[in-house]
Image (cartoon, rainbow, N blue to C red):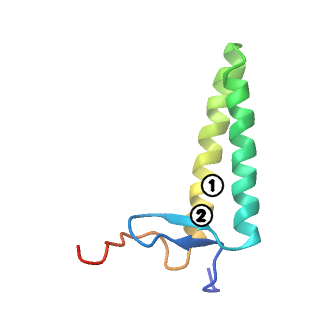
Amino acid sequence: MSDEKGWFAPKKFGYGSGLPTAWQGWAVLLGYVATAVVAGLMWESGDEVYTVAGAAIFLVATIAFMLVAKATTPGGWKWRPRKGD
C-alpha cells in the first residue's frame, strides 16, 4: 500500500491488525460481520447443503478479511513485543 495511513491500525504488541482507523476499514469489518452472521444462519438451518455452504462462505470471508486487513495495515503484520520483553 502506498499511503502510510492504512485502513487498520497495527497492534501495539502481538501479531496482526487492531481496530479500523478509516471508514474503509469499518466498511470491510461491517461487511465481514454481516457475511459471518448469514453464514452462521445457514449453518444452523439444519439442511446439509446450507450447512456446507455456510461453512464454505465463512471460511472464504475470513480469509478475504484477513488478506485485506494485512494489506491495509501500515507496516504490515509482524511480531511487536511488549516494552520490557
**Residue type of the residue flagged with mark 2:** Ala
* Residue, disc 2: 69
The reply to whether discs 2 and 1 touch (Cβ–Cβ < 8 Å) is: yes
- The C terminus, quarter of image: bottom left
Q: Where residue 65 is drawn, which disc sits there?
A: 1
Q: Which residue is drawn at 71% across and 37% down?
A: 37
Closer to us: 38 or 21: 21
Instruction: Determine the residue located farthest toward the front in the rendered image.
Output: 84
Q: Residues within 10 Å of mark 2 (few under 14, many from 20)?
A: many
Left or right for 43, reference 76 = right
Residue 70 x/y as whole percent: 55, 66
**Total marks in image:** 2
The percent coordinates of residue 33 (x first, y second) are 70, 47
Name the image quarter holding residue 36. top right
Q: Residue 19: horizontal and vertical position, in percent?
A: 60, 65
Q: Percent x, y for residue 31?
A: 75, 52
